Amino acid sequence: MPTISRFYGIQIRMFFDDKHGPHFHANYGEFRAQISIADGKILAGDLPPRAKKLVQEWRLLHRRELLDNWKRARRQESLVDIEGLS
């Protein structure tokens, strides 16, 4: 599962999984979450409140890029890195 972004100790990863539709994975220390691109709903796992807020802010800023990467993943193409928060 490729890492497509990193910021504040958070890693964002993505791969194709047709069970949940467009989503990404956020890892922060020992915490893991699977997050819907469309609405930010946590599909599995959890993150601490501050990390969750940062991931949601990042998701809103990069929703289009996330969806483009999701389409690439479905076609088994290389994913494009997405800028993190600064």
Image: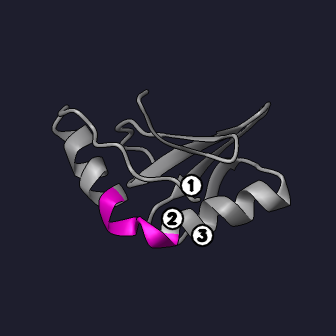
Q: Residue 37 location, x and y as percent?
A: 45, 62
Residue lying farthest front?
86
- Tag 3: residue type? Glu
Residue picked out by circle 1: 35
Q: Residue at x 30, y 49 (%)?
A: 70
Residue picked out by circle 3: 57
Q: Secondary structure at mark 1?
A: strand
Q: Secondary structure at mark 3?
A: helix
Res 38 seen here: no
Quadrant in the rendering for residue 85 = bottom right
Front position among marks 2 and 1? 2
Q: Are marks 2 and 3 in contact (CB under 8 Å)?
A: yes
Q: Is residue 80 left or right of residue 14?
A: left
Magenta range is: 60-65
- Tag 1: residue type? Ile
* 63 magenta-colored: yes
Residue picked out by circle 2: 59
Q: Residue 73 location, x and y as percent?
A: 26, 39
Q: Residue 79 location, x and y as percent?
A: 28, 38
Front position among marks 3 and 1? 3
The C terminus - image quarter:
bottom right
- Dot 1, how many residues are within 10 Å of its Cα: few (below 14), some (14-19), or many (20+)? many
- Dot 3, how many residues are within 10 Å of its Cα: few (below 14), some (14-19), or many (20+)? few
Q: Are marks 2 and 1 in contact (CB under 8 Å)?
A: yes
The first of marks 3 and 1 along the sequence is 1
Give the main secondary structure, helix, strand or loop, of the magenta stretch.
Answer: helix
- Tag 2: residue type? Arg
- Label 2, label 3: how far apart the Cα atoms are: 5 Å
Q: Is residue 1 above or below residue 57?
A: above
Res 74 seen here: yes
